[in-house]
Image (cartoon, grey):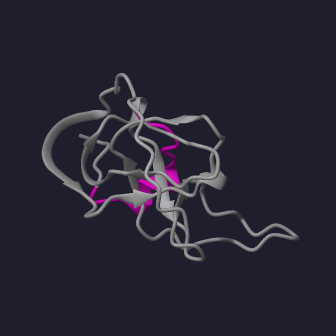
Amino acid sequence: MNLQPTIQKVAGKKEFLRNTVGLEHKTAGATLDGSKFTDGEYVKAGTAVYKDADTGLYVPWKDPSDGGENEEPDTNREGAGLTAHDIKIVNGGNAIVGLVIAGHPLENKCTGVTKGFKEEVKGYLRFDV
């Protein structure tokens, strides 16, 4: 495990929240699985992620598959939320990012929000306000 922290300044952050009423963050943030993102990519604030049951790391949200011929449906979507700020993925690293788990985001300003994601976080993240 690499415990050498890397600090990078990221200029700008788009606002993806309607307001701060009922805003809650996950304690201690979320560790992103760097192998599931492109090296050098900036993961934008408001990106939908969830905790992978096998690794315990957060990965980009994808709706559960319909269980095709060679595919097992992955229905465990524990810990779903939205990244709280922009973060750059560095080669071989697993970035730690704040995670919004309750509040009022603007759907059109978020990334990766699907019908399945909205169903998973229903009652916590309110897109319909």
The total of numbered circles placed on residues is: 0
**Residue 111, horizontal then vertical, whole percent:** 49, 37
**Of residues 28 and 93, which is closer to you in this image?**
93
Please provide the residue range marked out in magenta.
110-124
Residue 67 picture quarter: bottom right
As for residue 122 lying within the magenta part, the answer is yes
Residue sitting farthest toward the right:
69
The quarter of the picture where the N terminus appears is: bottom right
Dominant secondary structure of the magenta stretch? loop
Q: Tell me: 16 left or right of 44.
A: left
Q: Tell me: 103 left or right of 31.
A: left
**Of residues 118 and 61, which is closer to you in this image?**
61
The quarter of the picture where the C terminus appears is: top left
Residue sitting farthest toward the top:
12
Residue sitting farthest toward the left:
21
**Residue 77, horizontal then vertical, whole percent:** 50, 68
Q: Residue at x 50, y 56 (%)?
A: 32
**Residue 122, horizontal then vertical, whole percent:** 34, 59
Residue 52 picture quarter: bottom right
Q: Residue at x 47, y 56 (%)?
A: 4
**Of residues 31 and 22, which is closer to you in this image?**
31
Q: Tell me: 123 left or right of 5.
A: left
Examine the rendered structure and indicate whether residue 53 appears above or below residue 17: below
Q: Tell me: 105 left or right of 56.
A: left
**Residue 61, horizontal then vertical, whole percent:** 55, 53
As for residue 101 lying within the magenta part, the answer is no
